[in-house]
Structure formats: structure tokens, C-alpha cells
Image (cartoon, coloured by chain):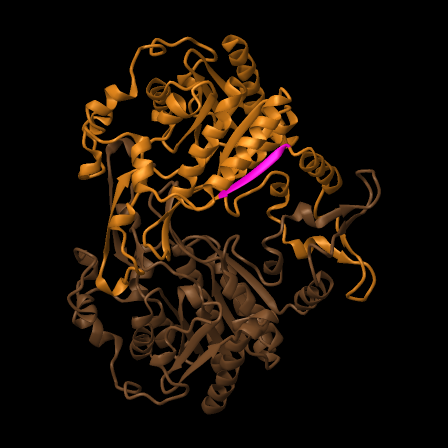
Chain colours: A orange, B brown
Amino acid sequence: MNDPVTDKVGGGVELATCGTNVSQDAFVSTGPFQIEGPKFRQTHMASGDAPASPTAEGRLAKEFAAPSHVEAEKALMAEFAQRHGSAGRRVVLITSGGTKVPLESRTVRFLDNFSSGRRGASSAEYFLDSGYAVIFLHRHRSLYPYTRLYSGVNLMDALQMEGEGESGRVLVDQQVLPNIGAVLKRYRAVKEAGLLLPVEFSTLSEYLHLLKAAAQALSPIGSRAMFYLAAAVSDFYIPASEMPEHKIQSSNGPLQISMKMVPKMLSPLVKDWAPQAFVISFKLETDTSILLERARRALDIYRHQAVVANVLDTRRNYVVVVTCNTQAELALTEEDAGRGVEIEERIISNLSAAHSDFIAQQG
Amino acid sequence: MNDPVTDKVGGGVELATCGTNVSQDAFVSTGPFQIEGPKFRQTHMASGDAPASPTAEGRLAKEFAAPSHVEAEKALMAEFAQRHGSAGRRVVLITSGGTKVPLESRTVRFLDNFSSGRRGASSAEYFLDSGYAVIFLHRHRSLYPYTRLYSGVNLMDALQMEGEGESGRVLVDQQVLPNIGAVLKRYRAVKEAGLLLPVEFSTLSEYLHLLKAAAQALSPIGSRAMFYLAAAVSDFYIPASEMPEHKIQSSNGPLQISMKMVPKMLSPLVKDWAPQAFVISFKLETDTSILLERARRALDIYRHQAVVANVLDTRRNYVVVVTCNTQAELALTEEDAGRGVEIEERIISNLSAAHSDFIAQQG
């Protein structure tokens, strides 16, 4: 198995950087370039990113149109959280899939982030198995819990007609959908118990507003709420005011796109929207050498509870769960993978235990 | 029904612009900006787009990496075309879905074109009903013929267990998948007769190379081949040589993306790869006022047989099929839509008749 960062990390070691009092404001006040040093790939600063920029929450309200259904979804999420919280159940908000960033008002083209939604969908199943109620905030048409197990199969190849007529019964070919009986039974049980609330987004704007709504809906249950932010959220966007209305014409020549940085919602989420909750973010990189440094920096900036750090090529069998004073490597052996064990089972086991400790500490 | 361009077009009228001998080279030699006039949204010309630029085919070979499976797919397509051509059957290549344009070598982010693949998938069914054999060159996970009818349904909600145990039979709930018996029977018949060959792409590079392979595979059957180019293909890309290897870091500040224009493959397809074939391109715009002018200009430049022109908001119930000397409006009434008639049935009926005339003229 390929464990590219193994030699750089220890399991559960306390690190010196933990607990140094570096707030996000300290970073912002020196300007975003100061974080990275002199290696600039991006070439200019838009005025909205100057040091005296407004808060993330202010920019969300001003620059991203709220979707029409956000209040209705918020009411559903609040009712869901209240119902399960009252029953003593923990509730996790999972975000899953990539966000779509339109390049035109009447959208033909958009920027997208690579994500099938597999990690979010499988994680939802393990959270449900661990006794959580799950709000599944996912990209429209991305992978869904349980159904994701058969996503590679063409529905028509999985069905058989009983007899010759068109009006007879249609059966599932269980060679094509292995284990379908057990999976269907579990899906039904979850659905009938009302343990899974799906909420959909497509665009970045929808995602950001629904995340805020979810955080506010979960805040009343305090430390029993977990945020598991696995979605692949764009770092860049084009403000609606700078977007062409119509399809960009290719006959006008090559294209220059200028994108602004998306405000980081983790900051108001942790500080204002759900300050008692247990919050986990994800860090996906392609460059192994910067992964853990970035995970640790995110914890320093946002002051949340854990970062699940992973590298694109090995994300299905190796992650590091980084907290303020620990880092735990979770890895699948060849044998695990052969038995169909998924890394998400290990991640949720680790985080569920950490969440228990967190709740106990909060009293 | 909203028919925004009705007042600008007549049905089947011969137009003065048809037959004027404007070659693509005449346009290219004045530079791409001259086509559009002074309203530039794009801001500079990359050197590769200068007047003396290499041919589209040369750029394809040089700037777009060929996928490893292209030769194997080409052999399958050639065998398919030869088999059906020998049986006197017409063969249509349908392209469907949007292309993915990576922004990084190890791709986390990409530019995408809006397309569910609905038009391509439904068109495939009507071509099959009209006696064509179909090569379906489609974006991975985009809508697929027959299966597309149930794409909005969660598989788990469509199944029922017979009895209580997990090992019993699993049945389709035909309330949830209406008409499934008839659809399944048709799918099976098409599959058993070997009339549908699926080929998948994800990236723009894969699409371009597979399109060339398909054109060369279909060329031997001459005028009995049709190209129905419904895919939403990006006009812009980033050459591999200018692409960052690793994920672009948001901490470096706002992002500037410079994209080059994608070479237009319609030109070598019509002139060199499959010169006897019947070729249809699509023109999707958001701005009604420029639609027909652009459709007609495409015919002037590429000298192919027809453009299906449509506007984003009304594309499901109104198109204009533009040929060198006709333009036919195809529209669904409210009543048609209520009965479940699809605009693709009308499009394929129109094009299939035109293809018959074309074959008769060539013969």
C-alpha cells in the first residue's frame, strides 16, 4: 500500500504548534499573500480581498444570492435536529459532493470540483450505524447512501421480466445487485425511523446559504451536533455583478477568467453559528509534502476540533485525523480492502469516539 | 408556449446567404476577432491563435493527449459500422453530455459545460426506433437511453422485498417505475440485436480523440453514416504544458485563468475524416437574437448538412433545423407536451427524412 506521508507523522503525538494563540484575524490583517510566502500563482488582488475586507458572513449576504428554498429547508433541518436532540440522539451534518460555480448568469459553463460524493455517502451509512441521525447536504445527483453501492450498474441490466408479457412482474437480478435484500432492508429501516434527511445543492451559493441554515438549525442541540464537512467546495467564484448574462462567445478569442476568493465559512460557523458543536473539516491535497502543515494551519486559524487530511491518489485507503494535540493515521491493509472494508468505517469510529469525549468535557 | 424566435424565421424558406462560397479559411485569415466585430469580452490573443495557426488536426495531435483506449474503441466502432453497413442499415454517431476541462494535471478542479445528456439519450431511442444502429459517444455518468426515463428515481425507493427475509426475491414497484415492462423489453431487444454501442468520455481530450476515431471508423460506409453532434463541447481549454501539476492553492489570492480556444473539429470531420457522411451540429445559445445568424454562419464555414438551433430556456419544446437552403421550425404544443411527446421525436423524424434524400442524391 502506498503510504506517502507515513514517515512524516507519528500517531497521537502532541505537537508544539498546538494551542499557540493564532487567530484568523491575525492572518487576515497581514493580507492573504503573507500566509504563503513569495510563490504566487495568482496574479492580482481584487479590491474585495484587501486587508480591511468585510466579514465572511457579510460577504455571504452581499455577494451570494440566497436560494428561494433556504428558509423551508432550514425549518425542516431545525425540526429534525430538535426531534433527535430531544431523544438524546447525536446529529451529524454531512456535506458531500462538489460545488458548481457558474461563469455566466444564464449558465452554460461552470467551474466544478472533482467529487463523486462517494466519501460523504458511505460516511452517512457508518454514522447511521453508529447511532447518529444524519442531515445529508449533497450535490444534486451525487452519490447517495445505500444507492451508491450500485452506482456503476445500468438499471436495465439489473432487472428481469417474469414471463413474456409487458405487464407481468419485474424482478431484480441479484447477481447484478449483490446483497440487495440486506441493503434494501437497512435503507427502509433508516427511512421509516426518519434518521436521514437529504438536502440538495448545486451551486456554490446554494451550498453556502444551506450550510449557514444547517448550522443555525443544529446550534440548539449544542455539543451533540457534529459537522462533517466533506464537500469539495470551490475556493474561487465570479461575483454575480461581474458575470456576463449570455453565453461567452468563442469567436471573440481566447478567454481570461478572473475569480475572487470565496469567503471561508468555517470561521463564522465555529465562532457564531454553532459555537458548541463538534466540527470536522477535510483537507484534500495532491502534494503530500504540504498536507499536514496545511491541516494544522487550518486548526490554528479556525479553532475547530479536527481535520481529516488526505491525498488525492490514496484517499480511499489512507487518511490522517489531525486534532489540536493528536494525529491519528488510519490506513487499510490490502487484506482489509480485499474484505471490502472501507476507510470511512475507521474514520467514523475515530470521530465518534472523539465526539463522545468532547460531549463529556463540555458537561 | 414561449417561441421567442418565431417572428424571425419562416419554414422552409430559401435564403440568400446559402451557397455563397465562404470557406473557413476566409474567416481564419482575418483573425478570430474579425468575425465578431468590436465587442470583445476576451482580452488577448495567445500566439497559438494567430492567423498562421496550424490546422485543427495538427493541434489535436500536438496539444491533446490521446487516451490509452482510443485504438481499442476505434476497432469496436469500425467493426460495428462495417457490420451494420453491410446489412444495409444506416449508422448514426450521437455525441452527448458535456466535456470536462481540467485546470490542474492531477485534477481537483475543472471547467464543465451544462448538459445532463438528456437530448442525446432520448434521441438515441428515436434513432433506434427509426431503424438506425447507434454509436452513443457520451460523457461518463450522463443520461443513457431508456435508463434516462427513471433518472430522477432513487433505486431503493423503486424496489420491494417479497416476504420478510433478506434472501427472498426483490420486485420492482411499478408505480414508481411506470411502464418499466415495455421499456425493459425494448432495451433488451436493442441490446440483443447489437444495435447500440456505448463509448464513454470524460475530458475534452478524450472526446476529441474519440470523435476523430469514430469519424474514421464510420467513413467506409459513406453517406449511410450520420453524425449527430449534440454534446456540449468546451470552446476553451488550458494546454497541458501551461497547467499547474498540483492543486491551485487558494491562500495565494484571487485566481486568473487564461484559456486557449479549442480547435474546431467539425472542419476536418467534414473535409477529411468522413467526407461523404451526413453531418448535423447543434447550436445552443442563451441570446435568441443571434441564434439563427450563428447557425447559418456555421453552415457557411463548415459546409455540413444541418444545424439544430436552440435556445437554452426553450430547448425542450422548440428548435429550428437549419440547412443550406431551408429552415424548419419544430415545436411542441401544450397538448403534445401533455401527452409526453418529446421534441427529439420530431427532430429525428425531420433528419431521418433529410438523410434519405441525401443518400438518394449521393447514390
Percent x, y for residue B210? 44, 61
Taking A78 as reference, is A6 above or below it?
A: above
- Residue A225: within the magenta? no
Q: Does residue A228 appear left or right of residue A86 in this picture?
A: left
List x then y, in percent, for residue A42.
22, 38
The residue lying at 36 percent from left, 51 percent from top is A110
Picture residue at 53% right of the left edge, 40% below the top? A199
Q: Position of residue B197 (x, y in %)?
A: 57, 64
Asked if residue A173 lies left or right of residue A357, the reply is right
Front residue of this view, candidates A101 and A64: A64
The answer to whether any part of residue A97 appears in the image is no
Residue B53, percent from left and from top: 21, 64
**Magenta span contains residue A196:** yes
- Between A61 and B274, the residue placed more toward the observer is A61
Image point (69%, 54%), residue name = B176
Residue B130 seen from this side: yes
- In this picture, is A239 found above or below B45? above
- Up/down of A115 relative to A154, above or below: above
Chain part drawn in magenta: A195-200
Which residue is pictured at 27% across the width and 63% down the height? A249
Determine whether A335 is above or below A354 in the image: below
Question: In terms of secondary structure, what is the magenta stretch mainly?
Answer: strand
- How many numbered marks are there? 0
Residue B341: name its quadrant.
bottom right
| A297, A92: nearer the viewer | A92
Tell me the quarter of the picture where residue A341 sits: top right
